[in-house]
Image (cartoon, helix red, strand yellow):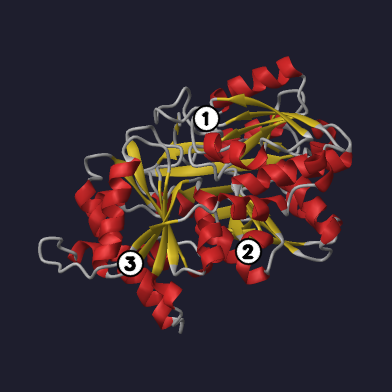
Amino acid sequence: MLGKVFKAYDIRAIHPKPLSEKLAWQIGYGSAQYLTEQASDAGFDDPMMRHIVVGHDMRKSSPELVTALKQGIRDFGAHVIDVGLVDTPFISFAINYLACCGGIQTTASHNPSNYNGFKLSKINAKPVGMTTGLDEIRRYAAMADRDKVTPAGGREEARDLWEAYREHVFRSLDPDLITGKKKLKVVVDASNGMAGTMMPKLFDDVKGLKITKINYDNSSGEFVHEPNPLVEANLAQVREEVTKQKADLGICYDGDADRCMVVDEKARPVPCDHLAAWLAGEFLRDHPGSAIVYDLRSTKALPELIEKAGGVPVKSRVGHVFMKAKMAEHDAVFGGELSGHFYFRDNFYADSGAIAFASVVSALARAGKKMSSLIKPAQKYAQSGEINFEVEDKDEALATLKKAYRKAKVESLDGITLDMGEWWCNIRASNTEPLLRLNLEGPNQEFVNEKVDEVSSYLGEAVAH
């Protein structure tokens, strides 16, 4: 069963089968073993390095899963600090604020309500993926038998860290918004997820923000629409309300509030790479010469604008595990991913939906211009969006493409990127599904459509996704 729930970046599956309370206990036990060992191996001997932060989201199955998880941690002999019902980025903050050996959030992010899972981080909130500890945790969990374990008596305590979290997030919020000297009208769709808890606790009394709330109620653990803001259909409510309220912008969150999408004052979705290009300039104004990390699927306009603003563009593989590693490696001040994750040096190089919100509204208030005009410089090229293909032999397909485009500059950071000068494309394998994903960019939409048809001929029929 364990093999069915461990994914590339986290643990996720349908509850209660295959993700049961029994597996949750094993995962807690295995995680405690790994997190305390890696703290010891790194030379940390502080007593707090046997403490693990634990939180959970609003799903119906979260309370029973987190109870079993915590018991597994305690039975191994590590100590639990339960921070309660929180958004996933809260865990990254709490690990660092309390100087713990790691943390675990019980969540299935944007998946349907019958799913659940666990997102893990280690010291300094460094992510745990399959190549950075998750495989070891799977092995430890597989060997853990609750019937044969003598509980080691780990302790548990509950902590309310919301005030400290608010203070941390507010370092990224313009003081003139806090006092009301500057004002914005904002629509926020919490997608019946953890943003429905996070947003009121952090931003309800900010005098300069008039927030129209959509889908804040997360008490049932069910969703009015799929909690995935990357699917345009899920933005319908926030777009309608932005138009109705004549708001300055709208934001839609995913289920655990670590990702978000922005719509401008014209209710048009803002691609995350375009948003990152604009925010990069804002960060570089305060931190000239800094590195900015970006996902390799992003528009070429993004690294061009970073360089124009005096920054150093750093390309990363897709996925928060790789983005966070690049952020730390280059001491990058900011990073953006096409999936809606935004990363911040002042947030331990980790992503945060709350700080993304604070950064966007602060930059917009300071600019005193419309969002659509601020994003315009990034709208230099035409993009295909991500197109999925079911391909039986992925390696053969990629090799065929390299032969077909012999004149291209080839990069193999993640799948293959073929750069033909006037246009480029990236084709990479999904980590979770039997798919190849194509992203292509060129000078105009007609040209892009033509090249998509051309490249697709080597990949087969696109599939709806």
Q: Percent from the top left, x then y, of residue 408?
A: 64, 55
Where does the image place residue 301, in percent across and percent down from the top left?
76, 47
Instruction: Give me the disc on residue 191.
Output: 1
Q: Nearer the viewer, residue 320 or 429?
A: 320
Q: Which residue is drawn at 71% across and 23% down?
A: 267
Q: Can residue 414 be seen in this view?
A: no
Q: Callout 1, which amino acid?
A: Ser
In the picture provided, is 449 more to the left or to the right than 391? right
What element does badge 2 sit on? helix
Q: Residue placed farthest to the top in the image?
A: 244
288 to 343, vertically: above or below: below
Tell me the CA gap for discs 2 and 3.
Answer: 26 Å
Q: Disc 3 marks which residue?
A: 32
Quote the CA–CA distance across marks 3 and 1.
Answer: 32 Å
| Numbered mark located on residue 327 in the image | 2
Viewer-side residue, 285 vs 171? 171
Q: Which mark lies nearer to you, 2 or 3?
A: 3
Q: Which amino acid does label 3 sit on?
A: Ala
Quarter occupied by residue 108: top left
Q: What element carries label 1?
A: loop
Mark in front: 2 vs 1? 1
Residue that appears at 53% across and 37% down: 197
Residue type, numbered disc 2 = Met
Q: Nearer the viewer, residue 329 or 89?
A: 89
Neighbour tally class for label 2: few under 14, some 14-19, many 20 plus, Cα within 10 Å = many
Packing grade of label 3 (10 A; few <14, some 14-19, many >=20) is many
| Quadrant in the picture for the C terminus | top left
Question: Which circle marks residue 427 in the picture?
Answer: none
Q: Where is residue 233 in the image (x, y as percent from the top left)?
A: 55, 23
Give the camera-side residue of 67 and 414: 67
